Image (cartoon, grey):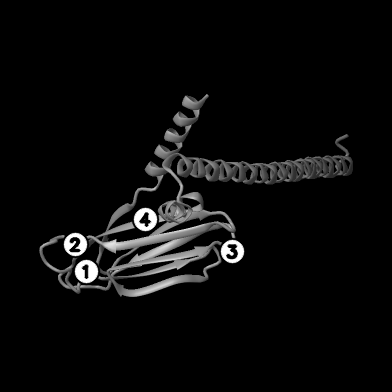
């Protein structure tokens, strides 16, 4: 039983570490690059970004700077910074949906390309576990168990969220099916009505011509 718990902890830690790797991308001067993250409401989220120095032996040139803006699903600005080479943000999501982080660099001649490291975490991954370990004075196993507990809680909440989404989709499917049924019934009624009118018109025409 203990071995199984340890294996579960190692697996979860492996998943967390692999899902928490920073994203590295290239940004051209005069261009914009946006990254979206689906975040649930009341979830903590943190982000860190910096320009990778192409030559660490020398300081970063002023041309390798960019602007960044983080917005909510409704378009509200949550973080802005201009002409920076590094920065970070943190907030609690007030609504669920796709949050957007956009990076753009001013036009430069000749054109330059900078490499940006961006680490965006939310939910359990946004928690500073090193601080938890220092403040709580817990050993390694306790810390891993705390991570496991928070992960299980997050999965439990995610399951309820997915169940709500499934119920919404089922309700939408039922409403769509009902509308399609009535639309098909109305189309059939109109077709029969048009056919009846055409039959009556032809019958009247032939009777006037004394063909029948």
Q: Are marks 4 and 1 in contact (CB under 8 Å)?
A: no
Give the CA distance from mark 4 to mark 1.
19 Å
Which type of secondary structure does the marked residue at label 2 adopt? loop
Give the CA distance from mark 4 to mark 2.
17 Å
Q: Residues within 10 Å of mark 1 (few under 14, many from 20)?
A: many
- Number of callouts: 4
- Looking at the rendered image, the disc whose residue lies closer to the viewer, 1 or 2, is 2
Q: In this view, does 147 lie above or below 78?
A: above
Give the CA distance from mark 3 to mark 4.
21 Å
Q: Which of 179 and 62 is in front in this view?
A: 62
Q: Are marks 4 and 2 in contact (CB under 8 Å)?
A: no
Give the CA distance from mark 3 to mark 2.
35 Å
- Looking at the rendered image, the disc whose residue lies closer to the viewer, 4 or 1, is 4
Which label's residue is closer to the chain start, 3 or 2?
2
* Rendered location of residue 165, percent (x, y): 64, 46
Residue under label 4, please give it.
119
Question: What residue appears at the point 10 percent right and 63 percent down from the top-left corner?
Answer: 57
Which label's residue is closer to the chain start, 1 or 2?
2
Decide if residue 115 is on the left or right side of residue 137.
left
Which label's residue is closer to the chain start, 1 or 3?
1
Residue under label 3, please give it.
94
Q: Do the residues labelled 3 and 4 touch (CB within 8 Å)?
A: no
Quadrant containing the C terminus is top right
Q: Do the residues labelled 1 and 2 touch (CB within 8 Å)?
A: yes
Residue under label 2, please give it.
53
* Rendered location of residue 106, percent (x, y): 27, 73
Q: Is residue 111 above or below residue 10?
A: below
Question: What residue appears at the point 41 percent right and 56 percent down from the top-left corner?
Answer: 120
Residue under label 1, please give it.
64
């Amino acid at each position: 039983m203990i071995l199984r718990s340890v294996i579960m902890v190692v697996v979860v830690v492996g998943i967390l570490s692999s899902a928490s790797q920073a994203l590295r991308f290239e940004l051209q001067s005069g261009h914009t690059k946006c990254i979206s993250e689906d975040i649930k409401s009341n979830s903590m989220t943190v982000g860190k970004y910096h320009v990778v120095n192409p030559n660490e032996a020398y300081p970063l040139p002023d041309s390798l700077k960019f602007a960044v803006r983080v917005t909510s699903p409704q378009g509200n600005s949550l973080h802005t910074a201009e002409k920076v080479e590094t920065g970070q943000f943190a907030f609690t999501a007030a609504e669920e949906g796709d949050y957007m982080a956009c990076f753009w660099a001013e036009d430069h001649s000749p054109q330059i390309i900078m490499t940006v490291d961006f680490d965006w975490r939310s939910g359990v991954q946004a928690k500073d576990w090193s601080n938890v370990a220092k403040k709580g004075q817990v050993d390694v196993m306790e810390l891993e168990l705390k991570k496991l507990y928070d992960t299980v809680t997050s999965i439990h909440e995610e399951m309820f969220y997915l169940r709500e989404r499934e119920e919404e989709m089922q309700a939408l499917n039922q409403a769509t099916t009902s509308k399609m049924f009535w639309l098909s019934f109305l189309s059939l009624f109109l077709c029969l009505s048009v056919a009846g009118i055409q039959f009556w018109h032809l019958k009247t025409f032939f009777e006037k011509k004394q063909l029948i």
